[in-house]
Image (spheres, grey):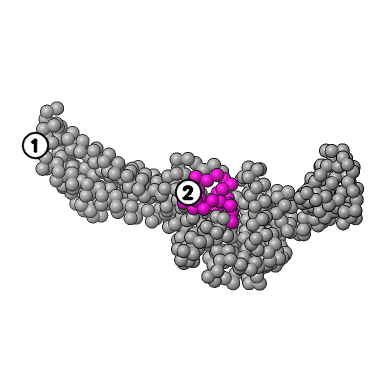
């Protein structure tokens, strides 16, 4: 126990450096996933087409062991930072995609029909009606993907990218069990802190009217 | 779009041999529909599910496209203009209301004016005007749809549809989801509102009583999208074109016709009512008069207008008011 606690003070500089690297890698992977998955999911959800394909392709991607992806990506991009980034994007992307898609597709059909009938264009319906209504579900996809990515980013060390908590977690012979536990603890804390932070972002982004509607469903 | 928001004249809507067939279906949804809704009138489309009433309505703002025939609004084919422009000039009210949950009431009403680039001042003025028109307090402007009752939401739906004062309105069972009391109230208010603003309205309902109440004209559709009869409520009730229409308007159509006329129209000014005659307001329907007569057991009712007695109405007069034009 003392070894576990003292690891934090003894290796503080190392832990801070690796934590920053871990955060950077995770943020990059999640941001790339958002940039690809949100527009794609929103568009497919808006068209109400291809749900079968999206859901199933998403499930297949999610079921792939990330370590296997790392191995496959070696063949394409070799070792290094790109490799682990690609692998983490493949992990996070389906989570953001399916949630965005489900959210946009699930916007009340009456609301969308009213918008169309009033003379809003497809783009206006998507950006002014569907996306604002989709924020809570989209954000929960992003939050989940953050947790998964942070918990998986240690694989960087197997992809030949150093500078993440994986350097310690995967090196039990170098740092001992106490080191591995300490690094894992940091990783867990990162996952929860990020999730909480994103929860605040979610609250900030969710339009007031929508929050009210979720709290007290309209009586119609 | 002109700068004024009021007094845009209504336009007639003409269906000219319109046929709509959904892919993969044998019978058309709408079969060679031809009819004219005169400017400023309300036409109720009634019929069974599968009769094509909603289809007919959605053709007008091109939510559904059709293959043959044409529809014109104020003489212009709806296919001659860009679909977005067309829809912004047509008020659209649906049963689900479809308010945007993330926008305030004022925000909802201001959507189309905003897209058309109206100034903030003009939008605010128009929003207040519309809230007054649908009898909602102006303070509702800052609330959200989730904070409103169903009836209040549909009032906002109406206000939103009227935002740019469109000459034409399409209403798809707009009051169908409301409880009976709210429904009657909002129906009456809409009738009032219609007398203030001139709109050509296509109003879809499955409820013949609502059609009789709301429609200047009623179009009865039957399975396969065939127009069975088109006329005023009185015409339909007095002379149903066939058994189908007679059945649709109901076996009690004689009583329903009584609802269409007021005591004022049949009162006999020279006849004095007997002493025991109950009083009925001159603006009450003949149906109310008949009911009053039956309930009291008197031989006639006294028709009053404010404090003034206009005269008496007997059972025979009520009967002849219905049978005269029928025979």
The residue shown at (10%, 39%) is A11
Q: Quadrant of residue A127?
A: bottom left
Q: Main secondary structure of the magenta part?
A: helix
Q: Report the disc number at residue A10.
A: 1
Q: Is mark 1 on a helix, strand or loop?
A: helix
Q: How crowded is mark 1: few (under 14 residues within 10 Å), some or many (20 or more)?
A: few
Q: Is residue A73 left or right of residue B323?
A: left
The stretch drawn in magenta includes residue B141: yes
Q: Which residue lies furthest to the front in this view?
A: B307
Q: Give A172 or B153, whichever is nearer the viewer.
A: B153
Residue at (44%, 47%) from the top-left corner? A210
**Residue found farthest to the left:** A10
**Could one spot residue B182 in this view of the protein?**
yes
How far apart are the alpha carbons under marks 2 and 1? 55 Å
Look at the image and give the residue range highlighted in magenta.
B133-156
Q: Where is residue B63 in the image (x, y as percent from the top left)?
A: 58, 60
Q: Residues within 10 Å of mark 2 (few under 14, many from 20)?
A: many
Residue depicted at x 56% and y 51%: B136
**Residue name at image x 71 percent, y 56 percent:** B215
Q: Mark 1 lies on which chain?
A: A
Q: Nearer the viewer, residue B175 or A191?
A: B175
Identify the secondary structure beneath mark 2. Answer: loop
Task: In the rendered structure, find residue B144 and report the number of the disc placed on it.
Answer: 2
Q: Which of marks 2 and 1 is in front?
A: 2
Question: Does the segment drawn in magenta span residue B209?
Answer: no
Please provide percent x and percent y for residue B113. Answer: 50, 63
Q: What's the mark number on residue B151?
A: none
Q: Where is residue A190 in the image (x, y as percent from the top left)?
A: 24, 41
């Amino acid at each position: 126990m003392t070894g576990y606690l003292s690891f934090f003070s003894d290796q503080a500089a190392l832990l801070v450096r690796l934590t920053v690297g871990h955060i950077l890698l995770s943020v990059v992977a999640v941001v790339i996933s958002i940039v690809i998955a949100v527009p794609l999911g929103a568009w497919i959800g808006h068209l109400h087409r291809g749900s079968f394909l999206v859901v199933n392709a998403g499930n297949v991607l999610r079921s792939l062991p990330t370590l296997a992806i790392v191995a496959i990506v070696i063949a394409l991009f070799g070792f290094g930072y790109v490799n682990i980034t690609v692998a983490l994007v493949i992990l996070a992307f389906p989570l953001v995609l399916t949630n965005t898609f489900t959210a946009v597709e699930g916007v009340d059909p009456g609301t969308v029909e009213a918008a169309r009938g009033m003379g809003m264009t497809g783009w206006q319906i998507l950006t002014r009606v569907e996306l604002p209504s989709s924020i809570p579900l989209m954000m929960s996809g992003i939050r989940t993907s953050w947790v998964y990515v942070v918990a998986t980013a240690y694989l960087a060390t197997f992809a030949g990218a150093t500078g993440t908590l994986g350097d310690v977690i995967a090196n039990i012979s170098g740092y001992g069990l106490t080191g591995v536990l300490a690094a894992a603890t940091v990783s867990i804390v990162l996952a929860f802190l990020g999730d909480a932070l994103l929860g605040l972002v979610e609250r900030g982004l969710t339009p007031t009217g929508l929050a009210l509607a979720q709290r007290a469903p309209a009586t119609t | 779009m002109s700068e004024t928001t009021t007094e845009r004249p209504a336009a007639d809507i003409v269906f000219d041999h319109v046929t709509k067939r959904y892919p993969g279906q044998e019978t058309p949804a709408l079969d060679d529909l031809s009819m004219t809704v005169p400017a400023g009138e309300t036409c109720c489309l009634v019929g069974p599910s599968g009769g094509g009433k909603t289809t007919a309505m959605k053709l007008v703002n091109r939510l559904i496209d059709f293959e043959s025939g044409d529809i014109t609004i104020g003489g212009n084919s709806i296919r001659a203009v860009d679909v977005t422009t067309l829809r912004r000039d047509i008020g659209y009210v649906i049963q689900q209301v479809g308010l945007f949950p993330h926008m305030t009431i004022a925000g909802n009403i201001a959507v189309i004016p905003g897209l058309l680039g109206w100034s903030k001042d003009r939008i605010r003025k128009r929003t207040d005007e519309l809230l007054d028109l649908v009898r909602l307090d102006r303070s509702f402007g800052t609330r959200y749809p989730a904070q409103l009752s169903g009836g209040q939401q549909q009032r906002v739906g109406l206000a939103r549809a009227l935002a740019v004062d469109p000459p034409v309105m399409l209403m798809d069972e707009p009051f169908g989801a409301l409880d009976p009391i709210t429904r009657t109230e909002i129906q009456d208010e809409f009738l009032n509102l219609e007398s203030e603003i001139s709109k050509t309205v296509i109003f879809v309902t499955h409820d013949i009583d609502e059609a009789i109440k709301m429609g200047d004209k009623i179009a009865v559709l039957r399975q396969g999208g065939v127009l069975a009869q088109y006329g005023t409520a009185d015409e339909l009730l007095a002379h149903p074109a066939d058994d189908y229409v007679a059945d649709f308007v109901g076996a009690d159509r004689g009583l329903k016709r009584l609802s269409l006329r007021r005591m004022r129209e049949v009162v006999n000014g020279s006849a004095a009512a007997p002493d025991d005659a109950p009083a009925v307001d001159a603006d009450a329907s003949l149906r109310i008069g008949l009911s009053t007569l039956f309930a009291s057991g008197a031989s006639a009712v006294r028709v009053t207008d404010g404090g003034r007695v206009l005269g008496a109405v007997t059972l025979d007069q009520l009967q002849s008011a219905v049978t005269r034009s029928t025979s």
